[in-house]
Amino acid sequence: MHPRFSSAISIAIAASMLAGCSSLDRLASLGEQPTLSAIENPTSQPGYKPVHMPMPTPMPASYSPNSLWRNGSRAFFKDQRAHQIGDILTVKVKITDKATLENETSRSRKNNEDSGIDNFFGKSKIPFMNAPVGSRIFTADSNGSSDGKGTIDRKEELQTNIAAVITQLLPNGNLVVEGKQEVRVNFEVRELIVAGIVRPEDIESDNTIDSSKIAQARIAYGGRGQITDVQQPRYGQQALDVFLPF
């Protein structure tokens, strides 16, 4: 058996087994509301990886003689904003993207070739053949054209708030945050996930931060439940979309 064909069969079998497990889970929850995920520590998840970013050279804190104020401090009294691992801050998710692109290309080309002779060394007929000289020896015409047009019109809007937890403190003081929110309405669960890196200076006095100020932002908004299940193609159709070449 060809190795590629054997690999394709193995993938198909594994996909069918996964589909079977998912089907059993769905059968077990017939008539029941989808369950919410348990509250877990993000750092203990199987796919969790600490963030490593380029860091500047650490600068020692400087103090002024006979002064209660330290250079670089953000407030005279204790700062109540999130600043250490385990603290919570509110992320104001506001995404309003709109893109409109339109491209059009048009090309046209036309060539004509025409060559011939009027006489053969001053004679109107070819010697020894007594045949007239052809006025046209080679004639060619070619035409080519292309017309291409492309249009993109996209609009996305998402506005909500979510509480995130500081999971890591980077050497330069930046904070790695991650938050997850689940809302169940009847038989449908909506999930919102936010993760990224924020600067303590960008956190506002009310302990909130705009999503536009999150570096390496990862924002996911989706759902699961009966409505989402109906909108998804069946596992067999998804497998055919992967393996069929046409």
Image (spheres, rainbow, N blue to C red):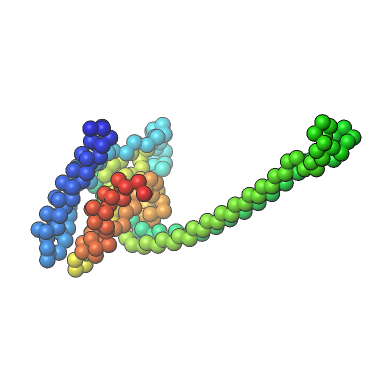
Residue at (72% x, 44% y) in the render: 139
Instruction: Choose between 37 and 162: the one closer to the eye.
Output: 37
Residue at (82% x, 40% y) in the render: 132
Q: Quadrant of the N terminus?
A: top left
Instruction: Choose between 162 and 233: the one closer to the eye.
Output: 233
Judge left or right: residue 208 versus residue 151.
left
User: How far across and down, in percent of the image, does residue 189 sit?
Assistant: 22, 62
Quarter location, residue 191: bottom left
Residue at (28% x, 50% y) in the render: 240
Q: Is residue 62 above or below residue 40?
A: above
Which residue sits furthest bottom?
186
Judge left or right: residue 234 versus residue 99.
left
Residue at (42% x, 38% y) in the render: 64
Q: Is residue 45 visible?
A: no
Instruction: Choose between 197 and 136: the one closer to the eye.
Output: 136
Instruction: Choose between 237 and 115: the one closer to the eye.
Output: 115
User: How far across and down, in percent of the image, does residue 9 sit?
Assistant: 22, 40
User: How far across and down, in percent of the image, does residue 207 sit?
Assistant: 33, 55
Quarter location, residue 123: top right
Q: Is residue 225 visible?
A: yes
Which residue sits furthest left?
28
User: How far across and down, in percent of the image, does residue 147 sit?
Assistant: 59, 54
Figure label count: 0
